Image: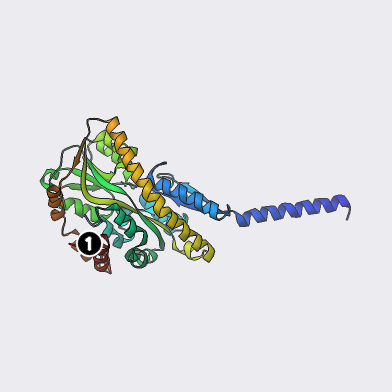
Amino acid sequence: MSLNKLFKATLSAAAIFAVAGTAAQAEEWKFAHEESPGDVQDLYAQEFKRLVEEKTNGDVTVTVYTYGQLGTENDITELTTAGAVQFSNASPGHLGTFVPEIQVFGVPYLLSQDNEVNKEVLSSSPTIYEGLSKDFESKGLKLYTMYPEGEMVWTTKKKVTQPSEFDGVKFRVMTSPILIESYESFGADPVALPWGEVYSGLQTSVIDAQVNPIFFIESAKFYEVTDYLIYAGQQQYTTTVVSNAAFYEGLSDERKDMLKEVKSELDDFIYEAQQKANAEALDRIKKAKPEIEVIRLNDEQRAAFKEASAGIGDSLVKEVGGDTEEVLKALRKEFGTEM
Ligand code: 6CS
């Protein structure tokens, strides 16, 4: 072989090796969430991306998709069960028709008023990670983590401080069936919608009220089309991050360990990030709309809503069955909210 030919053969072998090498290393994980850029789920997903890429020395790249890029909340759960997306946020508020048991997180007044307690339970509860996780596995999903996004605040066009004042109020809720029952028990007329339809729904009076954490009320601008922010202490917004179960099971032990490490670093990160996001958003809302009325229901007023919804846990147990009764009981104990 001439030197020239040898040089060309070596070059093409090197090129093939380089391409093959790149192909073997180029592993992409898709992470879809339910919120807008800069929202709490986006902060989580971006930090997950940073940590995974750093810990794998770039062998894995994570592509983050925000709300709408791959569809609505329910669409991204379906994409994850199908394996087209490796990770996604699937909030209990929208997950009720896929994993009915997770609706325990929609039971009013289940979580603690102390958010440090909520953080501990959501990040490490055996009831969640050993019990509820089996319900996810049976649907082809691996429950990766769970975290709080802040207290759910009602935004309404009408002042509401007791259940009778909800009469005739069309109240938007997320799509899990338990939420319809809960808001009916509070006295409202619930309407289930994806959040992308909420702003225009409020603007055109298709709905009169909705509930979300403050950071989201600011970012989706729901405060522009409502007049009251009402803290009823009734719920924390919780979300789960799920993975496609077959994908997760197929990972090497080394990758699984890396993901556990990432989860535990992110437990602290996201807890602090959501606190900051909610506090700053309330200040901005008050500045942008000084006439908005912020109402914090007192203990007596809260007790009326609590009493009105006291049967929701039992009806969930009846409807979903399985281990829901034990899960609810165990979670009430962990959150310190036994009845
Ligand atoms: O209200 C909703 O549907 C949306 N709220 C939040 C805080 N995150 C995503 C969710 O879909």
Residue named by callout 1: 316
Q: Give x and y (percent) for residue 324.
A: 26, 66
Q: Quadrant of the C terminus?
A: bottom left
Q: Quadrant of the N terminus?
A: bottom right
Q: Quadrant of residue 241?
A: bottom left
Badge 1 amino acid: Leu
Q: Quadrant of residue 38?
A: top left
Q: Give x and y (percent) for residue 65.
A: 45, 46
The residue lying at 27 percent from left, 33 percent from top is 286
Q: Is mark 1 within 8 Å of ligand 1?
A: no
* Label 1 Cα neighbours within 10 Å, binned few <14 / some 14-19 / many ≥20: many
Of residues 130 and 226, the one nearer the viewer is 130
Say above or below: 337 vs 11: below
The residue lying at 47 percent from left, 55 percent from top is 84
- Secondary structure at numbered mark 1: helix
Q: Is residue 252 visible?
A: no
The residue lying at 32 percent from left, 44 percent from top is 195
Q: Give x and y (percent) for residue 128.
A: 34, 63
